Image (cartoon, rainbow, N blue to C red):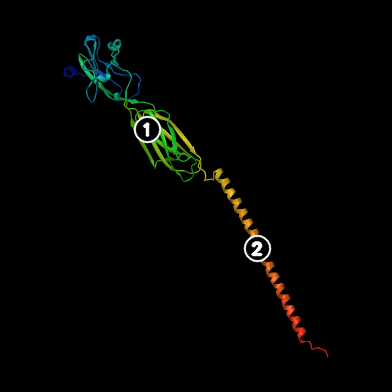
Amino acid sequence: MLALLLTALLAVHSIALEVHVPDFPVVVLYGTDTILNCTFLGAKNFNLSELSVFWQLADTQRSVHAYFDKQDRFIDQDERFANRTSLFPAELASGNASLLLRRVRVADEGSYTCFVKVDTYSKDSMFMQVAAPYSKPSVTWETDANPKPGDVVALTCVAYGGYPEAQVLWQDGSGQNLTENVTVSPVANEQGLFTIRSVLTVILEPNSTYSCRLTNPLLGDEGHASVTITAQAPVFPQVALWVTIGLAVCLLGLLIALAAVCHRKIKESCEEMRAEEEAKELEEAKELEESKTAATPLKS
């Protein structure tokens, strides 16, 4: 029905009526109410019964809102716009055909055409962009309880509930951009809002700081989060330290005991050798004395 009526309006198109809408994209926050501005000029002293206003989706020509014969018409309205649209009846006579759109959704993003007819007909189109702010990003990491320099660590930056898809920038402690070993995984929920998850894989250095910065293409910088990881050289746990000390003391005691035994054995060996030498010398002296006695002649 509306399609036939619009065809008839095109047949009486004239440049006498001018329709104006914003010539730049309009950014609207998700979940808020907004006004799609549309004004018309060139119609004077007309009766509202002569006025027809149609709002359509430019790409599909689906009806968003219709007004003619001094009444709003919802017969052919796209069901997703049900109970969410209205005009400003008190301002129609002054040339205001703007549309109030309530509780804006991600799916509402797109190009809208405003048609106006008062004896003659004109139209213009505008583009509406939807934006939703992300939650404050957070950075987490998983590794051993005592990270060491040289460990490979995966840092994860997460933010929720935003639109459109955000840009993620990783930086180190000196503000240097980190572009290698970075992955970004956007996932949209049923409402079209994104969860952004970015993973940065790094090799730890002592006292390393890493930050994740989130930027919404429509809303700008939406915050950042950072984490500092203190990586230390491996040290002995306290229990292991005491065990090591105990073993060292035992080993030292064993060495002392072994040294004492060896000293005693060497001393005994030396004494035995000295005794043997003394006995040998005594034996030799005895043999010498006997040989001298045997060589002396007996007196008559």
The amino acid on which the numbered mark 2 sits, given as a three-letter code, is Lys
Viewer can see residue 227: yes
Q: Residue lying farthest front? A: 300
Rendered location of residue 115, percent (x, y): 23, 18
Cα gap from disc 2 to disc 1, whole angstroms: 80 Å
Give the residue at x 27% y 20%.
Answer: 80
Residue 144's x, y, as percent?
Answer: 47, 41
At horizontal 29% and vertical 25% (from top left) the residue drawn is: 107
Which is more toward the observer, 54 or 226? 226
Q: Nearer the viewer, mark 2 or mark 1?
A: 2
Give coordinates of residue 49: x percent, y percent: 22, 9
Q: Nearer the viewer, residue 201 or 48?
A: 201
The picture quadrant where one finds residue 75 is top left
Q: Earlier in the sequence, mark 2 or mark 1?
A: 1
SS for callout 2: helix
Direction bottom: furthest residue: 300
Residue receiving disc 2:
265
Label 1 crowd (10 A; few <14 / some 14-19 / many >=20): many
Q: Quadrant of the N terminus?
A: top left
Name the residue that disc number 1 marks. Answer: 196
292 vs 22: above or below: below
Residue 166 visible to an observer of this rendering? no
